[in-house]
Image (cartoon, rainbow, N blue to C red):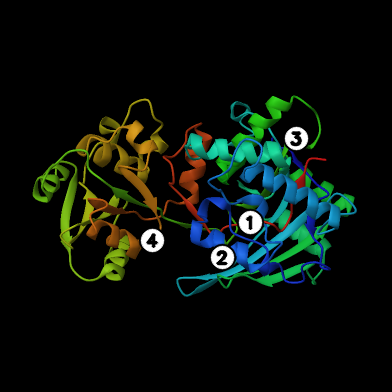
Amino acid sequence: MARIIPIRGLRYNPMFVDDLSLVVTPPYDVIDEEAQNRYYERHPYNIIRLEYNRVYPEDNTQNNRYTRAAATFRDWRARGVFVREDKPALYLYEQEFERGGRSYRRRGFFGAIRLEPYSTGTVRPHEETLPHAKRDRYNLLRACRANFSPIFGLYAEKELETVQILAAAAGIRPAVEFRDEGGQTHRLWPVTDPQTINRVLIILERYPVFIADGHHRYETALAYKEACNAPGLQNCALIVLVSVYDPGLVILPTHRLVKSPRSSALPDFLTALEQYFEVIPAAGDLPAFLSELGRRPKHSFGLYARTGQFYLLSLKTGTDLDRLMPADRSPSWRQLDVSVLHHLVFEKVLGLGRAQWAGEEYLKYTREEEGALARVDAGEFDYAFFLNPPGVEELVAVAEEGERMPQKSTYFFPKLSTGLVINAFD
């Protein structure tokens, strides 16, 4: 199945950077302008200068965010800011964090994955992607010829033997340990023993890889490989692999802000929803509302309108989704909460088509729950829709049937750290 390859990764040289919390960032797609500026100011060697360089009004084809990132990367390497691993390695990676009053530990490992088209079935997507993000990542990859941030991949190994083998070889003391700005602890152990690596790779050969985060990066890397048509590390992409059965794997929901293309009063909208859903006004504040949503049965959603009123929407008992949902979709896709919301509410009731989904005028994705209410109250959007998180088994079922969930269906928490290991193509 999917082929995983050890790499001689580049890592920050402790002589230049002794505290990695000052130079790493989350993935680029969760960094806004305020955070970008904060990372620039935090340290002169912060990875933001490579992964998500600033844009300036005077940028042109010769001098832009991508050419500046490439020049900075060359300079840092020449001055020894990064050092390359002596031997090919898999990097055991551990994140400790808290969520909802509970402590978690998620364990996986860095390596490289051989790039293959989705049609082979060895690497399987689970979400649809947006073209503008792929253009951005392609330009960066072409300029720098390196992966600064990893794809987040999942594989279905119940026994968790791979991380146990790596942990046994890694020893107790990590090569890297720090606490980031969000209070999460990161630890990294390079494992270079060939016999240990071979044992892990043999196990991994049984499993396909499901992309959890980083669809744009994988598809960009694949396009770059095909454009280069050359052997070597261009045929691989940096990845962190975590078992879907890891007890620290946490998925959070991504909510929706919607502007209706159809002018209608709230009572008319609620009446239209009642053909599919039980519509129940909810009392209390936002935390109580979300808590109640979490206790509702499958195919339940939260709705907030500009009146300041919360509503709980639950699919009516006995509703035949196989009849209502698109016939050309798989049973697993038709049963997803996010598919039901998009098809029955956005398409059928509100009249939002796919072209409108792709932009941000009518539909925007957010994890900011309080912020979603504020944007509705301010009149930027008509409604906020809140979802419960999908289960990992739903993601896997959809991917195994060769389908993709709608955009922004999942949010894996916490995000992987950018800048811990770099995969340079030379």
Identify the residue under disc 1: 48
Q: Secondary structure at mark 1?
A: helix
Task: Quote the CA–CA distance across marks 1 and 2.
Answer: 10 Å
Quick one: 183 or 197, which is closer to the camera?
183
Q: Is residue 165 above or below residue 277?
A: below
| Mark 2 neighbour class, 10 Å CA radius: few under 14, some 14 to 19, many 20 or more | few
Task: Examine the rendering and report whether any part of residue 239 can be seen.
Answer: yes
Q: Residue beneath label 4, please? A: 368
Earlier residue among tags 1 and 2? 2
Q: Position of residue 255 (x, y in %)?
A: 36, 53
The N terminus appears in which quarter of the rendering? top right
Q: Nearer the viewer, mark 1 or mark 4?
A: 1
Among numbered discs 1 and 3, the one appearing first in the sequence: 1
Label 3 sits on residue: 234
Check disc 1 and give the amino acid type.
Ile
Residue type at mark 3: give it: Gln
Callout 4: SS:
loop
Residue displayed at 16% across by 53% down? 279
Tell me the mark number nearer the camera, choosing from 2 and 3: 2
- Res 414 visible: no
Amino acid, disc 2: Arg
Quadrant where the image shows the C terminus: top right
- Mark pair 2, 3: CA separation: 32 Å
User: Do the numbered discs 2 and 3 sit on residues whose CB atoms are within 8 Å?
Assistant: no
Q: Is residue 395 left or right of residue 149?
A: left
Q: Are marks 1 and 3 in contact (CB under 8 Å)?
A: no
Three-letter code for the amino acid on which mark 4 is drawn:
Glu
Between residue 104 and residue 165, name the one nearer to us: 104
Task: Give left or right: position of 389 versus 187.
Answer: left
- Cα distance in 3D space between marks 4 and 2: 20 Å
Q: Which residue is mark 2?
A: 38
